[in-house]
Image: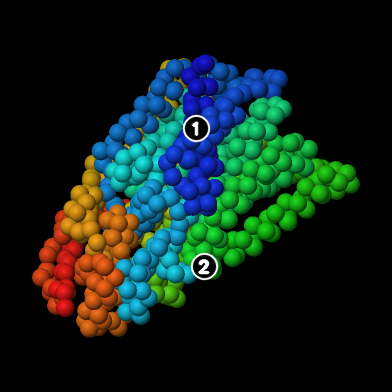
């Protein structure tokens, strides 16, 4: 097998394995039986079957034959040199090693990565949801106590983790293999798989020789480095997205049942993004239209693609509305319109299929399409693409995006933004969202040259597609443009960086880099036609890629060698050891409860509660007595010694002095901030 074919096959392996794992682990979780033995026993045959179906090939007669050796899938794919696969493998391995060394230890709940670690820890150790409140350890229900904390809702007499279960199900596999460190190291592993999957999509759509350039551009971008050092849900979502697109691309070049099954697996991978991130439902809507076109053309891969997407998305929604209902209720203002849009797209796609298959309307629509291909619309669409990007670039001159707070969480975000503004000497206005700078955010991370090439690539592709050419780009182009436009208009995230960069890495940055590489390859072909020697063209291509990398590295270089969030695992282990068996913890201070309530409950295995607003020291002493009568040892916890001193002799059981990522609002991120945390406890004496 040549290097090009090996690369494209290897690049879908991560997605196929993730699909197999989610396919067996979700039913087990829904049944309350997500444990190592049944999960692994089911996963091995499921993975073998998925890999066999996804990697076997039965090409269409004549597939891959073309008169242009530079086109993807043509003779270049058949004769790709050995160094293409070796370079991509080297980049992915180097990325993995770097990220393992620099991996953060975010396990104390302050933002999403630690929330996912705690979610995965509970699944790895208990295998079921929801999380019991253990009220009996505190003498039963008590108005002075609450059991919820950020990302862990108190709902219907239990604790329900925030977020969808897809990512924690994957992280739990690392927990079974290596405990907390195993969970954390899943992030670098998944990040390296993202780099490999992106290289595979570049190889398919642009050509294997360009795959190393694509892998390097993505791997060195700060957002990719950032999300691969923490347990972010974007990582499995990217793997499923890129792998699903690659499988659907492959299905177009196969025949018979092989094509159908690859289309099903591709659709399933894309649909399962919803199990990882609920907003993935928005990203996959173009896939339904894509499937509809093939159904209209009486190609069975359309039916199989739609079936896979609907099955995967349905599984995600089923998990969301059964195990993550409070989370979806919190997102109701976003989820309900999204579900309505999804229904509208399904209805519109069905109508399109009917109209295209009906002889009278189908003939007219095909004639209209031919007229568009011959007319001026393709050129106008290319110009419009450039104008839209120019509009995003000029947006800060005409708009300032603000959002008044509507919920307690919004109020907290306002306070946080005001704090960052004061640190950066910016005008204090906590309602600022900075969404008008969204294209500037992209330029920080991929550089202005890459952004210009991405615009050129998008313009060239829309013209080609409207002329009926380069049809293999139809679905990737539609998904990239659809999602990028929406994210740039409304990022929908707290606008501090590098945190906000996670909204871009899901599809915006990989998509624009894909356009960048396409435009670079197009430019090289044009230069070659001018008569320059092959050696000069290759040297120019390498130089061009190096120049594209310069601004990327200038932004990410400092971050690349900076470790943050270190020492948390050892500190928490020490805290858990200090909480003796039989302890039941009552947290009397807000920040400590927010950060440690689920840590105590999940990692230390001790019942944990927090005092409600308005609870008095007398309430705390009364609760301590109830804990003793329930057969447990009461432990009062807070951030400072004087906060627990009224209840007994203070003892410090945790101290962390580390660095965290800095926060910026109007410039690329750089530098770190100090981070110190302490936990003090006291044991009330028996009365």
Q: Secondary structure at mark 2?
A: helix
Question: Quick one: label 1 or label 2, which is nearer the N terminus?
Answer: 1
Q: Residue furthest right?
A: 360
Residue 349 vertical position relative to residue 553 in the rendered view, above or below: below
Q: Is residue 428 left or right of residue 159?
A: left
Residue 686 vertical position relative to residue 444 in the rendered view, above or below: below
> x and y percent of residue 639 in the render?
19, 68
Q: Is residue 187 left or right of residue 528?
A: left
Residue shown at 33% from the left, 48% from the top: 230
Q: Quadrant of the C terminus?
A: bottom left
Residue shown at 45% from the left, 57% from the top: 129
Residue 163's disc is none
Which of 626 and 463 lies nearest the eye of the viewer? 626
State the scheme by which the image is colored: rainbow
> x and y percent of residue 477 in the render?
58, 43
Residue 206 vertical position relative to residue 675 in the rendered view, above or below: above
Which of 269 and 600 lies nearest the eye of the viewer? 600
Q: Secondary structure at mark 1?
A: helix
The residue singled out by tag 1 in the image is 44
Which of 440 and 683 lies nearest the eye of the viewer? 683
Q: Is residue 499 left or right of residue 290?
A: left
> x and y percent of residue 471 in the render?
66, 36
Q: Nearer the viewer, mark 1 or mark 2?
A: 1
Residue 386 vertical position relative to residue 408 in the rendered view, above or below: above
Query: Tags 1 and 2 in contact by the CB under 8 Å rule?
Result: no
Residue 387 in view here: no
Residue shown at 43% from the left, 75% from the top: 407
The residue singled out by tag 2 in the image is 329
Residue shown at 38% from the left, 53% from the top: 122
C-alpha separation, residue under disc 1 versus residue under disc 2: 36 Å
Q: Residues within 10 Å of mark 2 (few under 14, many from 20)?
A: some
């Amino acid at each position: 097998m040549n290097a090009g074919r090996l690369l494209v096959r290897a690049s879908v392996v991560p997605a196929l394995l993730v699909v197999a794992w989610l396919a067996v682990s979700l039913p087990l979780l829904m049944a309350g039986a997500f444990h190592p033995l049944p999960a692994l026993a089911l996963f091995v045959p499921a993975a073998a079957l998925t890999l066999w179906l996804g990697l076997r090939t039965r090409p269409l007669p004549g597939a891959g034959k073309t008169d242009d050796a530079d086109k993807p899938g043509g003779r270049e794919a058949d004769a790709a040199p050995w160094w293409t696969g070796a370079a991509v493998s080297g980049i992915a391995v180097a990325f993995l090693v770097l990220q393992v060394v620099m991996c953060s230890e975010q396990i104390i709940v302050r933002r999403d990565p630690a929330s996912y670690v705690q979610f995965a820890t509970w699944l790895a150790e208990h295998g079921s949801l929801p999380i019991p409140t253990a009220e009996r350890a505190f003498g039963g229900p008590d108005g002075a106590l609450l059991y919820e904390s950020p990302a862990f809702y108190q709902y219907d007499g239990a604790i329900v983790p925030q977020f969808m279960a897809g990512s924690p199900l994957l992280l739990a596999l690392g927990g079974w293999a290596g405990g907390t460190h195993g969970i954390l190291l899943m992030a670098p592993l998944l990040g390296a798989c993202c780099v490999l999957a992106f290289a595979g999509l570049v190889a398919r759509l642009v050509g294997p020789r360009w795959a190393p350039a694509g892998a390097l551009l993505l791997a060195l971008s700060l957002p990719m480095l950032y999300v691969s050092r923490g347990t972010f849900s974007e990582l499995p979502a990217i793997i499923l997205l890129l792998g699903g697109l690659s499988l659907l691309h492959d299905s177009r070049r196969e025949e018979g049942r092989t094509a159908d099954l690859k289309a099903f697996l591709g659709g399933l991978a894309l649909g399962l993004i919803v199990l990882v991130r609920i907003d993935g439902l928005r990203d996959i809507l173009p896939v339904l239209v894509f499937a509809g076109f093939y159904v209209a053309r009486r190609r069975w891969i359309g039916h199989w693609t739609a079936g896979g997407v609907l099955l995967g998305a349905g599984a995600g929604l089923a998990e969301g509305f059964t195990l993550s209902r409070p989370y979806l209720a919190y997102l109701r203002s976003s989820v309900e319109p999204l579900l309505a849009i999804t229904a509208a797209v399904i209805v519109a796609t069905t109508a399109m299929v009917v109209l295209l298959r009906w002889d009278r309307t189908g003939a007219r629509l095909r004639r209209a399409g031919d007229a568009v291909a011959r007319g001026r619309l393709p050129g106008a669409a290319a110009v419009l693409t450039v104008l839209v990007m120019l509009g995003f670039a000029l947006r800060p001159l005409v708009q300032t995006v603000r959002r008044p707070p509507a919920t307690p969480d919004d109020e907290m975000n306002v306070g946080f933004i005001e704090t960052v503004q004061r640190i950066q000497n910016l005008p204090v206005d906590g309602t600022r969202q900075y969404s008008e700078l969204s294209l500037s955010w992209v330029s920080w991370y991929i550089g202005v040259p890459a952004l210009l090439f991405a615009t050129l690539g998008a313009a060239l592709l829309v013209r080609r597609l409207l002329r009926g050419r380069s049809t293999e780009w139809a679905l990737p182009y539609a998904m990239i443009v659809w999602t990028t436009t929406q994210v740039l208009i409304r990022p929908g995230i707290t606008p501090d960086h590098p945190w906000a960069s996670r909204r871009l890495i899901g599809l915006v940055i990989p998509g624009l880099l894909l356009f960048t590489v396409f435009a670079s390859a197009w430019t090289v072909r044009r230069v070659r036609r001018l008569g320059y020697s092959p050696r000069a063209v290759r040297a120019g291509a390498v130089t061009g890629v190096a120049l594209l990398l310069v601004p990327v590295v200038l932004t990410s270089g400092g971050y690349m060698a900076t470790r943050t969030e270190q020492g948390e695992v050892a500190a928490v282990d020490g805290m858990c050891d200090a909480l003796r068996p039989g302890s039941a913890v009552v947290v009397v201070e807000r920040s400590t409860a927010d950060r440690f309530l689920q840590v105590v409950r999940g990692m230390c295995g001790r019942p944990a509660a927090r005092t409600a607003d308005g609870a008095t020291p007398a309430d705390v002493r009364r609760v301590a007595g109830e804990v003793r009568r329930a057969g447990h040892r009461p432990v009062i916890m807070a951030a400072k010694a004087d906060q627990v001193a009224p209840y007994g002799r203070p003892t410090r059981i945790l101290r962390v002095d580390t660095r965290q990522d800095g926060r910026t609002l109007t410039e690329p991120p750089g530098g770190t901030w100090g981070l110190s945390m302490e936990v003090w406890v006291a044991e009330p004496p028996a009365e």
